[in-house]
Amino acid sequence: MPLDDYGLLSGTLHRHFRDQPDTQGRWFHVNLEVDAPAGRYRCAVDVDSKQSTTGVQWKVFTLAASALGPVAGLGPGYHDLARSPGSGALDCIRHPALAPRAGCVFVRRPPAWLRAVLDRLNPPRPWISGSNLDAAQALEPLLVPGRVVMVFGEPFGQGLGMHNIHQNQGDPYGSQWWDENGIWQDGATMTRRPDGRFDVFLSKFSTQAHRTDDDGHPA
């Protein structure tokens, strides 16, 4: 079964801070404090563990608001999202603005000029691998206090906050997260730039598959 709940928190970034050692158990987070009409939310963005051998992967890029569908126009607050294309829900594998570029099939490697044109028209979005500190350092430049921020993930069961702000599909069979696999329920952190575009941070764990079936399990 997928996550119990999934949605988007839209608000204003107050500040961010990293977990101190051992304060959040095994997993290490960059925490965002986001102001919205219901109060100040804590959003725990997973950037892997200082102790774990499970690696973290991430992407940072910029998107036009139009690429995000209806969510770019939602007002401040938490909004439930239907787990389907067109609702504004995210899927790191299926959403055309987030997925790695599918590319074209060539019998031979295309010439450099054609590759440059393709990169401009449809830029590749590969995953970057590194440590939890590398991932935190990639995210933090986006976190400008006072900016509008959109956080996709699962709301806390109690209190104001969001977690599961990472890819939520592709976990392997036998893992403790297998039952939470699902499509169109991925997490992300986005902040709005002065020009109206959004800076995007996506993260996943190295054990999560890059291809999944209709249930979000590794394909």
Image (cartoon, rainbow, N blue to C red):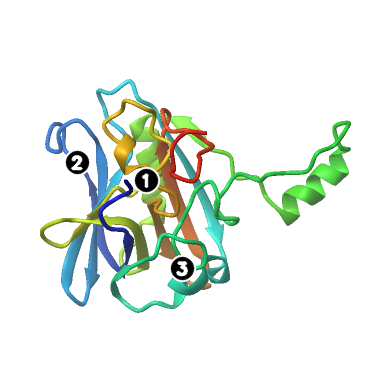
The Cα atoms of the two marked residues, 1 and 3, are separated by 18 Å
Q: Is residue 170 left or right of residue 175?
A: right
Q: Is residue 211 left or right of residue 191?
A: right
Mark 3, other Cα within 10 Å: few <14 / some 14–19 / many ≥20: some
Q: Of 59 and 99, which appears nearest the observer?
A: 99
The Cα atoms of the two marked residues, 2 and 3, are separated by 32 Å
Q: How many marks?
A: 3
Q: Which mark is residue 19?
A: 2
Q: Helix, strand or loop at disc 2?
A: loop
Foreground disc of the pair 2, 1: 1
Q: Is residue 199 left or right of residue 74?
A: right
Q: Which mark is residue 87?
A: 3
Which amino acid is tagged 2? Answer: Asp
Which amino acid is tagged 3? Answer: Ser
Q: Residue at x 36, y 49 (%)?
A: 140
- Which circle's residue, 2 or 1, is located before the other in the chain? 2
Question: Mark 2 near mark 3, Cβ–Cβ under 8 Å?
Answer: no
Q: Is residue 201 above or below residue 219?
A: below
- Which circle's residue, 2 or 3, is located before the other in the chain? 2
Q: Which mark is residue 166?
A: 1
Question: Mark 1 near mark 3, Cβ–Cβ under 8 Å?
Answer: no
Mark 1, other Cα within 10 Å: few <14 / some 14–19 / many ≥20: many
Q: Which mark is residue 99?
A: none
Image quarter of residue 56: top left
Q: Is residue 45 above or below residue 212?
A: below
Which amino acid is tagged 1? Answer: His
- Which circle's residue, 1 or 3, is located before the other in the chain? 3
Q: Position of residue 181 (x, y in %)?
A: 37, 42
Q: Helix, strand or loop at disc 3?
A: loop
